[in-house]
Amino acid sequence: MSLKVFLTALAIIDDLGAVGVIALFYTAEINAAALAGSAAIVVVLIVLNWSGVDRLLPYLVLGVGLWYLVLQSGVHATVAGVLLALTIPLAVARQTGDSPLLRLEHAIQPWVAFVIIPIFGFANAGVSFDGFTLAKLLQPVTLGVTLGLFVGKQLGIFGLAWIAIRSGIATLPDGASFRQLYGVSVLCGIGFTMSLFIGLLAFPDSLVQQDAVKVGVIAGSALSAIVGAAVLGLGRPRAATSQATEPSP
């Protein structure tokens, strides 16, 4: 369970980092007036949160305005979603007895999982394999994306985690070993939505390069899934393995 929490936290932080990269490096021009309006809405959202407003409607209405102004400002509109989520209260509301943020999350989760992400995948993951050869896997863009996901992610995550644990800043997840931590670090190389998103933003005018990015994402994700699953499979404790295979009475 502790490894699942670690992996989930990493996935969230990774996506937030990707949004930050989009905001910093893929913003061509800035509309100062729209950006100021966005900042004003964020301030209002924070005030609502601090004032104990736990109804979702005011946040959602202001969120639509925030999305529009961020879009007009020149900053990528995905930033608006992150800012809005940070201001919706997580604490349990007195009237409803639940968390407004969790209530919203549960309400939109089926739409995101079964509608939005599949549409994004089908719209952006189409790759033409006409004339494809293994040599194309060694092209700079394809190879760079593949190695970035498969090698870069595991080195960065496991390396920093190892340093933090050895230096005493952090501890291993409960019941986990360094081998299992490494396996989870490899699994973090499975990238799809944000990897494709950033790759397509990097080459907006070249279909050839976009296809190279897509092949690199697929190759890097496949390698990460296979190797990560193998490492975690080898790292299972013998007791847990025998209990899983022992027939129930």
Image (cartoon, rainbow, N blue to C red):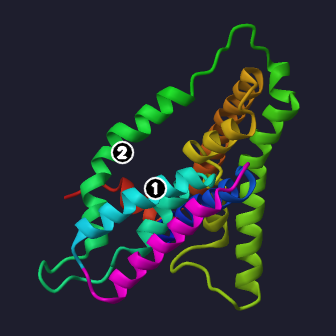
- Whichever of labels 1 and 2 marks the residue nearer the N terminus, that label is 1
Residue at 69%, 34% in the rendered image: 219
Is 178 drawn above or below residue 223 in the view shown?
below
Residue 44 among magenta residues? yes
Q: Position of residue 175 (x, y in %)?
A: 51, 77
Which mark, by number, is residue 113? 2
When asked about the image quadrant of residue 204, the answer is top right
- The magenta segment is 28-53
Characterize the local packing of mark 1: few (<14), some (14-19) or many (20 or more) Cα atoms within 10 angstroms: many
Q: Position of residue 186 (x, y in %)?
A: 66, 55
Is any part of residue 37 visible from this angle?
Answer: yes
Dominant secondary structure of the residues highlighted in magenta in the image:
helix
Q: Amino acid at mark 1?
A: Trp
Label 1: state its secondary structure: helix
Q: Amino acid at mark 2?
A: Ala
Q: Which part of the image, by quadrant, shows the C terminus? A: bottom left
Residue carrying label 1: 67
The residue lying furthest to the bottom in this view is 168
Residue at 68%, 40% in the rendered image: 201
Is 152 drawn above or below residue 45 in the view shown?
above
The residue lying furthest to the left in this view is 95
Is 68 drawn above or below residue 44 in the view shown?
above
Residue at 59%, 62% in the rendered image: 33
Q: Considering depth in this image, is 203 or 163 the residue closer to the camera?
A: 203
Q: Which part of the image, by quadrant, shows the N terminus? A: bottom left
Q: Position of residue 224 (x, y in %)?
A: 65, 46
